[in-house]
Each structure stands twice: as structure tokens, then as C-alpha cells.
Amino acid sequence: MKQLGRALAIQLHSGPRRVQLSIHQRLLEIPLDQLLVDARAIRDRQFGSRVTYSPKVFIPLTMLCRDKCGYCTFAQPPARLENPYLSAEQVLAIAKQGAKSGCHEALFTLGERPELRYDVAAEWLKANGFDSTVHYLHDMAALVLKETGLLPHANAGALYKDELALLRSVSPSQGMMIESLRDDLDCHRGAPDKVPQRRLDTLEWAGELKIPFTTGILVGIGETREDRINALEAIAASHARHGHVQEVIVQNFLPKPRTGMQHEAPCPQDEYLWSIAAARIILPPSIHLQAPPNLSDDFGILLDAGIDDWGGVSPITADHVNPERPWPALDKLRVVTEERGKALAPRLTIYPEFVINPTVWVDDALHFPIQDRSDAEGLGRDDPGQVWPEKVTAADVVLDGAEVVLIGHRSTQWYSGANNPPPSLIGTQHDGTPFNEVDVDQLRGPIAEILQGVRLGQRINEAEIVTLFSARGKEVRAIAKVADDLRKQVVGDAITWVHNRNINYTNVCTFKCKFCGFSKGPLSLNLRGTPYLLTLDDIANRAREAWDLGATEVTLQGGIHPDFDGDYYIDVTRAVKDAVPEMHVHGFTALEVTEGAKRLGEPLYNYIMRLKEAGLASLPGTAAEILDDDIRAILCPDKINTEEWLECHQVAHEAGLRSNITIMFGSVEHPLSWAKHIVRTRALQAQTGGFTEFVGLPFVHMASPIYLQHKSRRGPTFRETLLMHAIARIAYHGLIDNIQVSWTKIGPIGAAQLLQAGCNDMGGTLMNENISRAAGASHGQGMTEDAFRAIAQPIGRSLLQRNTTYGRPDREPARKGAVLTS
Ligand code: SF4
């Protein structure tokens, strides 16, 4: 009962106690318009404005089938086919085309057990060393996965439990249409695999095996509305037992030439819409509902009936099941979706609800291939371009850069730290035309409601932050606009920067943060690269050099050397201040400070006061990573926890030192962790007012140990990166005025977009930035005022040099072009 739409439920509950039995009749009695309203309401409550599709390539492994269904044009007799099966080379060629076109899914579609009907199929399998079509499918799915990274979806019909289990190891999801539970349909007379019990058994076994499963019904093949209700209820019942049905497809019958049903009438539109709406009402709301867009001329109306997914859409291969009906172009799909106030998002073959719980739903071997294509929500990465499995080899020359180099196919999507250009999400589109201005008042859905609240001065909470991170398309532009309006209101148009130098005094570290490509063990424990430790003289010389080049700040950060006690950090601070008394010393993460105090057995406040007396003026926010201890347990289990990070900054603020907030995002965590991080740091800022800025640090994956061990994503997508900064502007509004772009990780083209989405600061010139490079980032190690201006000017913004705490620098401007090259 609880899955029924509100209006319908009220009607049902208002009647006498014959309710359960009359559900079907009531559905049949409710006017279509009302049913559609109910279905849409359920969809909107569950999925908000999101509508998904799966960018896929269609691999028709064999078009032979032992069944003969009256509506099918897919199955062919052997005489019509050159070969009974696609060869491995053909399979791979199609899959590679898909990967080059930016697909995420390889949809294997095939006839049912052709070897039982056609000798030619049985002989081919035997000659090639396979017991059955399913075994061949297993090997081809494994091949595609290994070579292209496309995630297979096996659509192999009615299978036995051992066959489903075999495919589970290579196919993150599987599918089989129930079609209908009527056992007397003319169209299924020659189809032994369409016996309803065989279909139900397959569905049930898939549930027992914890396989994310796609199923569905056909509408208009001779069944009645009651039959459809029965089939949908059977699906819902199996899902209630196992929780495995990820989506249900409601597909309309269309007569096709040269089929048994070629002279039958197509499924009437009202009947189809009724069936979709009935499915939405009968099924649990969490099951996604799909209708193929290529089988309806006016496919936008399918959204009116309650679907939230368009299914697989291929940029390159035909729909082999409905070859006469090409898929709409993606642009058209987007326009139609947005016309109905929805936002389009690419997904993987396995839905996010299952992606985020892989230990239950996915074979161990598939965890990483799925993670490798996922965004933070468990949807498909949505930056345009290709995603190939990354293969690396050790670098010949390491110096201070990454220790691995990429080989093989190069992915062309944007990644933080890589040179691939980001997509244009705001400002100007790729073809040079500006995006239409988004009228926030015209948007609909949960994101629009939150933004309207922001414009009325409301502060967003944790749940609302999570919702904003789900934005797509126009919604992203609306968030960017609201954030940028706040930026203008608070700090105006100037883009600030600080002339500074990074001094990473050692890369030796006793901690084992799983994302860190920078740290090395001490020589005795050396695992990788060359450990170094700068002397105090080196540090002082670097500070002097920096001052001579115009710097006002040095940023001191490094590994936690086993030989350091807390006095080391005081000595380093003094070394800089003795060399250049005017230099602002911005240094030491909460880890270094906490560890320094701990190693001396000194109270944190005393220790911070001694650092301050030595000349320390502010603290960087790094070592925060993600302030969510469940995630820290994965990323940096031996590091300070959330409370300790917050305490260190609170004590520093009490001691009169300013600091900033950083977040390293895009490795293993989900948006809820981002929201927790923002809300917790915001609460501290409300208490102390000591944070000067927020700095988003997108995870650079390329040479990061956790990525090389196949345990993280490839960093955030560009959309997530832009949203992180824009949402930070909105969430911290009234408490933190400055939102900084990390150019080392985002690059100048991406930085220009972020500066139009709420950011106002470019950070520092850095001069020698080693940490991002050690993780594989390829943006340079230093910036100049001119390089900052080259980003600011084209977007119509002025440039303003600042000091560390956002005042004006009290020394002569930097020498032009002054940058270290070493
Ligand atoms: S992030 Fe810092 S503490 Fe962690 S291993 Fe790297 S250098 Fe050490």
C-alpha cells in the first residue's frame, strides 16, 4: 500500500476493508489524467528533477535465437547471417568505437540459447572452445571490460542460476524483460523461453544472487491491463524479497514488417501512458522507471507518465531490437527533458543505489571498474570525452614530479591536474555562443526551491547542500549564478592573489595517507623516490629568494619526519623570520601542529603560542582532507581525526592566528561527506571567525597511491568541482568572504569558469609547488601576476594583489615576470 501515490492512497484508504483486493480495480477506474498526476508526484518525490540515461554501445553478440516471438525483428535465421556469432575482434571493435564516443556501457544483447536450435551455432561454439552462448558472452564481456573499461550489461534472456552467477563476475548488472505473465499469448507460441515461470525464476535467482537487475513489461502484445498489473506486482514482490530490481522498462509494441504481428495495431498511446503510470504506482518508488525514447514520436509525454530514465542511448550503434527507430540525438533528449523542468544525467549500467553499496551488489573484481567511471553520486562521469582504463609504468626520471607515466589509450575527459580541457559549464559554450541566462525563478524542483530560499537570505543546511550537489545542466548554471551574485555583493569584481612561495621542507613522512603521492619513507624504509630534508639554511635562503622576487608570504608544509620534535617547526619559523623579518609565515597543517605539541608533551595552546611568538602568522587548512571520520578511516586512518582538526584551528583562532578551510574532494567519498565538512567548519567559523577563506582541492588521482591500488575514483568531475566552489560561496555566505581557486589542480581554463561561479581569489604564485605534481598534476609549479591577469581580463575582472589575510601588501609590487624556474 505505501507505494501508492498520495491521491490514490487516500482513495483506497477511504473505502471499506476490501482495499487490498480492489487495488487493481481502482487503478482501472481512475481517469488517466489523475493517474498521470499521481505517477508524476511519486517520481518527483523520489527523484526530484533528475532524469537519467545510459550512454551505451549495443553489441549484438548473436542474432540467432531458439525462440520465435511474433513481434521480433532481432532474431534472424542462420542463412541471413554471415557468422553465427560476432568474433572477439568484432566485439572489441564495436566496444572501442563506443569508448571513443564517450559511452559507459556495453549492452550485450543476444538471442536465447541458439545452440539448442541451430547446429551452426552449436558447432561454432564448439570450434571456438565454448560450452554455450552464455560462456561466450562471459568471455566477451570480460574482454570488453579489460580492454575498454566499458561496463557490460548482459541481456541474455531467461537464465539458470549458475549462468547468472557466471555473468555476475563480468557484468555489473543484468537484465531480462518479464514481458507478460500471460501463458497463452499468440506471439509467444514458438518461444519456450517466454514461459512465464522461466522468466519469474530468472528474476528470483537474480535476486538471490544479489544482481542489480533490469526487467520490464511489453505493452500491446495481446495482454490486458489486469495482466500488466499482475506482472508489475510479481516484479514488486520479487524486489520486496531481494531488493535487486534497479529499473523496470515499460515498452510499447510497434508492428514491424516481416514479423508475425506485422498487421497488428501498435500499442495505443493512452494504453501505453496508463501502463507507465500504473507501473510507477504499483512498483516501490525507489525502482527506476524507463521508457525508450525512440519508440514514441512525441517522447516527452513519457515523462508526464512518471518515468525517470530514458534507458540506453547510443551515439554510434543502432537499436538492434528496433532497427527502424533510431535513438534521438542527445541534444534533443536534453532539450525535451529540460522543457519539462527536468535535468538530464548520464548513468552507468548499474544504478547509484547499488554503486554506493558494492560489497553487497557487485563482484569484487568489478568494484574498481565501476568506481573508475563513477562520479560522487554513483552516476556516470559526465565530462565529455573518453574514459579508458589507465595503464601506468614507472617514470624514468622522477625529480619532484609523479613517479608513474601513463601508457596506452589516453582518456580525454577533464581530470583535476591533467591537461585535458574542461567542458564549458557556464559563460560561453564550446561553439562560442553564450549560454542562455538562467532565470532562477523559472526553474522547478528541489534545487530551485533551495536557491529561492538562499535569495531570501536563508542559510542552507546539510541536506540542502547534498541536494545542490546533485545539480545538472541549467541547475548548475543557476547555482553558479546565485553564487556569483553573492560574490559580487560581498567582495566585488576584483580577483585577488598573493605573492608567495611554497617551501615543502621534507617529503619524508611517517604517516601513510593513502592519497599522498608526495611522501616517502625515510631512506632506511625507502619504498619509492628520493627522500629529502631541507636544512634550516636552505629554508632561509628560499625565503630570502622569495622576498627578493616580491613575495609577501611563505607557505611551509611538509611530511612528518620521524626525527622532528615540536621544536623543529619553531626553528623553521625562526629561520624564515631571521632571514626576512617582514615575511608572513603561513605554515604547518593541523597535523603538524598537533603532532608537534604531542611529541613535546605540551598543551596545544601553549605550543601554538610559542609558534606565534617565533613568527608564525597563520595556518593552512590542509590535512583536513574530508572532515568525516568514516572517510578519514579510508584515506588517512593514522592521521588526526575531525575533532582534532577542528580543535587545532579553534585553538589557533583563540591564540590570534588566522587559518583557512580546505577540502580534498573526489576520491572515495560522496556528497554527504562534503556537506558534513562544510557544515562543521561553518559552525566553527560562526564561533571564532578565524577562517579567512575556503579552498577547494580536487583530488589529483594520476599518481596517487590509492588510485594506483584501484581503490578510488579519478577525482571529481568538472561539474562537481565547479559546484564545490559555488556551493561553498552559498553555504558560507555571511561567514567567509573569500572562495579560492586552486589553479595547480584546476588549470587556467577551469579557473576562469570557477571565478564566474562564486570564486574571488586565485591563491598564491607558489613558485615551487611539489605536492600536486607528486600526485601527477601537470599544471606548472608557479604563476606570475601576468599569468593571473591573463585569466582575469577575458572575463572582465580586475586583479588585485593581497597579503595573506586579504589586506593590501605593505611592500612594493612584485617584479614583473618574477618566477622561479627551478
Ligand atoms: S598527506 Fe601529509 S601526513 Fe599524509 S602521508 Fe602525505 S605528507 Fe604525510
Image (spheres, helix red, strand yellow):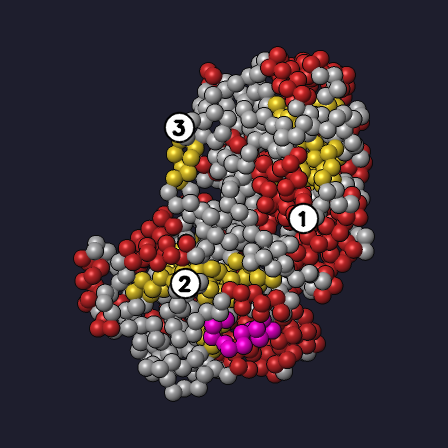
- Contact flag, marks 2 and 1 (Cβ < 8 Å): no
The residue that appears at 51% across and 36% down in the rendered structure is: 778
Q: Are marks 3 and 2 in contact (CB under 8 Å)?
A: no
User: Which residue: 31% across, 76% down?
Assistant: 68
The kind of secondary structure the magenta stretch mainly shows is: helix
Q: Distance between the Cα atoms at labels 3 and 2?
A: 39 Å
296 drawn magenta:
yes
> Which three-letter amino acid code belongs to the residue tagged 1?
Ile
Is 746 magenta? The answer is no
For disc 3, the neighbor class at 10 Å (few under 14, some 14 to 19, many from 20) is few
Task: Identify which residue, 96 or 379, lies in the foreground.
Answer: 96
| Picture layout, residue 534 above or below residue 275 | above
Pointer 2 residue: 316
Quarter containing the N terminus: bottom right
Judge: label 2 CB < 8 Å from ligand 1: no
- Badge 3 amino acid: Asp
Whichever of callouts 1 and 3 sits on the residue coming sooner in the sequence is 3
Q: Nearer the viewer, mark 1 or mark 3?
A: 1
Ligand 1 lies under 8 Å from the Cβ of mark 1: no
> Which three-letter amino acid code belongs to the residue tagged 2?
Ile
Magenta range is 293-305
Q: Position of residue 659 (x, y in %)?
A: 73, 30
Residue 327 appears in the picture as rendered? yes
Q: Is residue 7 left or right of residue 123?
A: right
Q: Which residue is mark 1?
A: 795
Cα separation, mark 1 vs mark 3, equals 40 Å
What residue sits 38% from the left and 39% below the top? 407
Q: Which residue is mark 3?
A: 396
Quarter occupied by residue 127: bottom left
